Amino acid sequence: MVNSPPHEKHPWRPTRLRMARFATFAGFFQLGALMFTWSTGTSPLRSHLGFDGESGDSQFGLIALAIGVGAALGAFVIGPVIDRYGPRRVVSLALVLHPLSIIPLAYLHGLVAAMAAGAVLGLCRGASDTAINAHGVQVERLYRRPIMSAFHAAYPAGGFVAGLIGSALGRQFTESPAVLFTAMGLAMAAVGLVCARWLLSVDEVPPAAEHEVSAADASRRRSTLVVLIMVGFGVLLLASMLSEGAVADWGQEFVRREVGTSVATAGLAISLYSGAQFAGRVFGDRLTQYVGPIRMVAASGVIAAAGVGIIAFTSSATLAMVGFVLIGLGLASMAPLMLSSAGRIDPDNAGRNIGLVNALGYSGMLVGPASITLVVSNAGLAWMPIIPFGLMLLIALCGPLLMRFAPRYGESSPPRQAEPAESQS
């Protein structure tokens, strides 16, 4: 008796695929919500730990460093686990453990304990990021068209919601983040428990298209080349994340001091950047489908570089706003395109490949602040844009070359049948 292909055990209905897509949105929403829960809770956390003021900067910096190292390590080590057990099992755990991992920080005392808790939070954050991206690639292969940018749009949406909640609770509880971290941790864990049942299992994949089979076979024959390609994607993702960090950390201060605006106007520039990035991710998939991923990466790099160039040389607040909008639009689709391409080059090793790319990208959290601070300290704030400008040109030039290694998106829809052979719990 001939065994049926794995995908035939789970024939598709539109509802099943939509729920898997919704669960992926929820995963990215959770990532953004927890990141901004951390961001809005840092001041109460410093007060709780006794790290207030300039005297506490170095201790708090060590906690942030522990989170960054943990995130890079978690993003990398979880990849082979995903390939072996499938994104569903790993994401199901991550959607619960990641939210819960932020709670202990609010109750521990002392630098060593806080660093240990931060490292655990980072491990869970990196693992969750890689796992949900791997699941997103699995869903994208079923849709056979670009959908990763829309998934990533849920990240700032979650951050916006968590930012509002964190700001409100931060005004009420200034001495400790216990209420914020506990409430958001438990709420996001509940979201994870509910959504985990809709994730795709390891055998719920469509039969590989001919171009995917040939690309995967070529990848296995040239494993060293594939690793080098992943390193290339990782470097470009690092460049993208470092540029995002430069805008987040220094953008408002740059506009206020170099352009000569008020604090409120400078804050509006950052808000416009965030809004443009969200809009770019909402519409990025359709643009990618229309112009192709190679042109999309090149155009994104050029647009972002143009935005950086404008803010570097303008003294007009209006032009500075335009520049930040262009940066947001340019950066919007870079990470989704890099991670999607990494996962599609060899679907059987998508977890390993995405994990490697993500780990290098997360290292931007470690080298980014130091490199920008070095430039600002030695050359002045006016030279801050020089690093993101160069990185965006690097992406515009090298990104299209790397994107050529990724297989094209499929043209057909996933197979559909009347009823599923077995229900998914």
Image (cartoon, grey):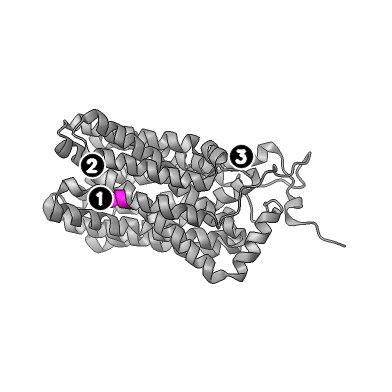
Query: For the magenta stretch, what is the residue range?
Result: 386-390
Looking at the image, tell me whether mark 2 or mark 3 is earlier in sequence order. Answer: 3
Which label sits on residue 219? none
Query: In the image shown, does 401 or 129 lie closer to the viewer?
Result: 401
> Could you tell me if the residues under marks 2 and 1 are in contact, i.e. CB atoms within 8 Å?
yes
Is residue 56 shown left or right of residue 235?
Answer: left
Query: In the image shown, does 55 or 222 lie closer to the viewer?
Result: 222
Residue that label 1 marks: 386
Q: Is residue 304 above or below residue 403?
A: above
Label 1 environment density (alpha carbons within 10 Å; few <14, some 14–19, many ≥20): some
Kind of residue sitting beneath label 3: Met
Q: Residue at x 42, y 60 (%)?
A: 359
Q: Residue at x 33, y 37 (%)?
A: 163
Asked whether the viewer can see residue 383, the reply is yes
Number of callouts in the render? 3
For the residue labelled by badge 2, is the local secondary structure a helix, a strand or a loop? helix
Q: Is residue 34 above or below residue 280?
A: below
Residue that label 3 marks: 19
Kind of residue sitting beneath label 1: Ile
Q: Residue at x 75, y 41 (%)?
A: 416
Query: In the image shown, does 96 or 386 lie closer to the viewer?
Result: 386
Which label sits on residue 312? 2
Asked whether the viewer can see residue 30, the reply is no
Query: In the image shown, does 310 or 59 lie closer to the viewer?
Result: 310
Residue 132: x and y in percent read 51, 50
Kind of residue sitting beneath label 2: Ala
What secondary structure predominates along the stretch shown in magenta?
helix
